[in-house]
Amino acid sequence: MAAALLLLLVPPVGLLAALAFLARPRGARVPLKGRHVFITGGSSGIGLAMATAAAREGARVSILARNLARLEEARAAIQRDSGRSDVSVHAADVRDADAVARALEEAGPVDVLVCNHGVFVPQELEKQDVEEIKWMVDINLMGTFHLIKAALPAMKTRTRETRLPGSIAIMSSQAGQVGIYGYTAYSASKFALRGLGEALQHEVITDNIHVSLIFPPDTETPGLEEEHKRRPELTNIIAGSSGGMKANDVAKKALDGIKSGKFIIPCNFEGAMLAVATAGLSPQSSPVMAFLEVIGAGLMRFAALCFQWNWFSTIEGYYAKNKKRE
């Protein structure tokens, strides 16, 4: 009600001017050319697509994953597609803080860190093994902490020396914005990344480092193929209605957002609506996006309630139908 009253009292131009004053952190352009971009999960999927695109823009690229043979294949592909020879590979498990620290030391100071690693096994919490839950949390969440902790000191030195903004980009998921049946453990690990990113942005903004959270939908990767083998039927019914994307398209959206210093990076129209609906207290550097969040908050909340009604109706109908069969 208060927001609606404010909109009646303040003309749109005046509201935009107020939001331009309030929006924080200030917008920034994060260049890639001639800079060091370090990407985890870089041997396939979105990570490989981002590494290739960054190399094409003139960045020195380093990629990290667990399998050295696949890393070497990825390096050859990046070199072939970008024409650059300075691509380094680092084999490490992000759960191993010491191994991650050694890889960052070998790679050298990083200008743009992309925490793209992640695993996903969908299943109802009651049926899922605790060790499998811990595995997802250790990789998706703790692995991100390990990377940022290892990279941050040298990143701060780099931004002071170059006087150019740095970036820490974290690959979340639309399941890190809204919980879905069968995604309990996965969503927990991805929602946590948002809290990490929001607090971290406060801690590093005076070092001229911008944090970005990327929220892709289902993306055509080898990991998605494995996920479909385990997804509960109800998850397929609910999440299957959402359109997927190709890895190259997600990579382009992600890099464009990183270069613009955006905190929230949606990857499609549904993601843009989710970004408005879940804006909350997140940082916002764009007065235009802030304006859309302010005027769209009520409408997006209504849309969210419609989606929740549909999902709960689907769940209730599914279980009622299966109960009749018993």
Image (tube, rainbow, N blue to C red):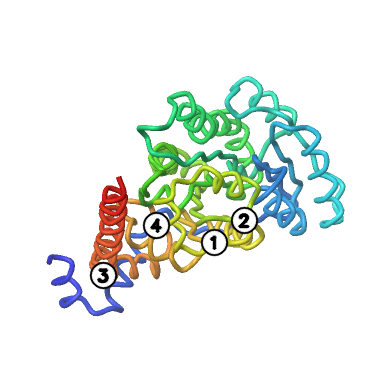
Extreme residue toward the front, this view: 326
Q: Is residue 199 visible?
A: no
Please give the residue where the numbered disc 1 appears in the rendered image.
244
Q: Which callout, 3 or 1, points at the residue further toward the start of the chain? A: 1
Please give the residue where the numbered disc 4 appears in the rendered image.
238
Q: Is residue 219 left or right of residue 180?
A: right
Task: Give the spatial CA distance, label 3 vs label 1.
Answer: 25 Å
Q: Amino acid at mark 4?
A: Ile
* Disc 1: CA contacts within 10 A as few (<14), some (14-19) or many (>=20): some
Screen quadrant of the C terminus: top left
Which SS class for mark 4?
A: helix
Which SS class for mark 1?
A: loop
| Residue 173 spot, x, y in % from top left | 48, 50
Q: Amino acid at mark 1?
A: Gly
Depth order, front residue of 89/291: 89
Mark whose residue sits in front, 3 or 4: 4
Residue 220 badge: 2
Q: Which callout, 4 or 2, points at the residue further toward the start of the chain? A: 2
State which quadrant residue 252 falls in: bottom right
